[in-house]
Image: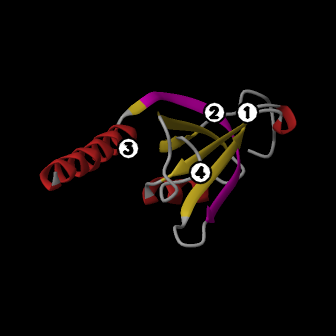
Amino acid sequence: MKRLLILIGAAAVALFFIVYTILYFTNYSEGVRSGELIKLTSKGVLFKTWEGEISQGIAGAQLFQFSITDDAVVGQLENLQGKYVKITYIERYTSFFWLGDSRYFATKVEEETPPYPNTNY
């Protein structure tokens, strides 16, 4: 009986790690979005995460929120605050609280020419 309980416990732990690995390392989708970088913040109490937001429409009509885990991307975004940017991202099935608030994770950022005339750029 004791051996059966140990086997069931080991199977439960193994199943947990398999599910965790699939959710953590598997990407649901990848893509590119462009817009004006309007927000970049580091937030959290125990686990600090970087969160960003771009406006994809006129007057912030459509917002895209994303998390950043790469410090190099954070540095690039800090220099591009208020500019029109192109964000390359991956979407995961879920997010864990120590990674960020969003399921979208920026992997690359480039400055982009805005599709509308604006002298602020």
On the image, numbered disc 2 is attached to which residue? Answer: 34
Say which element carries label 1: loop
- How far apart marks 1 and 2 lie (CA) works out to 7 Å
On the image, numbered disc 1 is attached to which residue? Answer: 56
N-term-proximal mark, 3 vs 2: 3
Q: Which residue lies at the image location 28% right of the left edge and 46% below the top edge? A: 12
User: Which amino acid type is shown beneath numbered disc 2?
Assistant: Ser
- How far apart marks 3 and 4 lie (CA) works out to 14 Å
Say which element carries label 4: loop
Please name whichever residue, 28 or 119, is drawn nearer the observer in this view of the structure: 28
N-term-proximal mark, 3 vs 4: 3
Q: Which residue lies at the image location 72% right of the left edge and 27% below the top edge? A: 115
Dominant secondary structure of the residues highlighted in magenta in the image: strand
Mark 3 Cα within 10 Å, few/some/many (few <14, many 20+)?
some
> Does residue 27 sit above or below 53 in this rendering?
above
Say which element carries label 2: strand
On the image, numbered disc 3 is attached to which residue? Answer: 24
